[in-house]
Image (cartoon, helix red, strand yellow):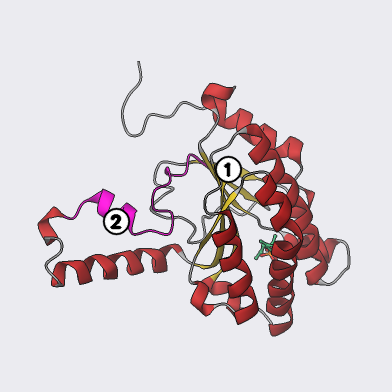
Amino acid sequence: MSVALPRHVAIIMDGNGRWAKQHKVAVALGHRQGVETLREIIRTASNMGIQVLSLYAFSTENWRRSPTEVAALMALILEFFRSEIDELDREGVRIRILGDKAGLPPAQRNSVTDAEQRTRSNQGMQLNIALNYGGRGELVRATRALAEKAVNGDISPQAIGEQDLRDHLYTAGQPDVDLLIRTSGELRISNFLLFQSAYAELIFVDMLWPDFSVADFKRCLDTYAARSRRFGGRTE
Ligand code: FPP
């Protein structure tokens, strides 16, 4: 299976709210349970030798949720980085935040920036955590940066190609997404890694994120390995 191991796996961790409802507990507890799943999946992916794991933790649209839920998510993010950073660093995991860190509350901003700095030279799995992230916003930001370069005469508009755009995404330097998994049965990509997922294999799992296990994750990798990827070409 190692031949067909995806280099870059992205996950839309959906269904924490429904899990909380099913268990008749506050939504914050659903998210807390979701963090348990996330910890196990990070560890598994890192041990399996996956190069890049991208997790959609908080979108630019998630600010529309109730202040209580936003506060609960922000508290969990802080707690996650405080409690996990030592182990992640020990495992050689390199952390990058995808999204607009400037829009995060100061405590979260400092904590995630510290985690990025501390792990920047690590050689193990690249862990991308999307926070205050939106795929369209990411493309607008890259376009703006390229337009500025063009105006300054640093690049000619005719010379701008896919690679230039790629180099200005939050994921600059990383391979495209090979496998995109979404839990909870919803069949959408919800503005996640739009450019990077152009040829990703999509797997939708009819299971809420807190219930998603390491075995389920491995099943997704097996499904991926069994698919044939043609990138618009033809095989045989
Ligand atoms: C979707 O469930 C999940 C989220 C919006 C957030 C995912 C966040 C975590 C798993 C924890 C925080 C992250 C870190 C990095 C510590 P939903 O609430 O949309 O579920 P629903 O569709 O059933 O309501």
Magenta-tinted stretch: 160-180
Q: Nearer the viewer, mark 2 or mark 1?
A: 1
Residue 49: x percent and y percent?
A: 60, 34
- What residue is disc 2 on? 165
Q: Is residue 33 above or below residue 6?
A: below
In the image, what residue type sits under mark 1? Met
Query: Is residue 208 shown to the viewer in this render?
Result: no
Q: Residue at x 56, y 60 (%)?
A: 116
Q: Nearer the viewer, residue 194 or 101?
A: 101
In the image, what residue type sits under mark 2? Leu
Residue 80: x percent and y percent?
A: 73, 62
Q: Is mark 1 within 8 Å of ligand 1?
A: no
Q: Quadrant of ligand 1?
A: bottom right
Nearer the N terminus, badge 2 or badge 1?
A: 1
Residue 215: x percent and y percent?
A: 75, 35
Secondary structure of residue under mark 2: helix
Q: Residue at x 20, y 67 (%)?
A: 149
Q: Is residue 225 shown left or right of residue 18?
A: left
Rendered image quadrant of residue 57: bottom right
- What residue is disc 1 on? 125
Q: Bin the neighbour count of mark 2 within 10 Å (Cα to Cα): few under 14, some 14-19, many 20 and up.
A: some
Q: Nearer the viewer, residue 229 or 130?
A: 130
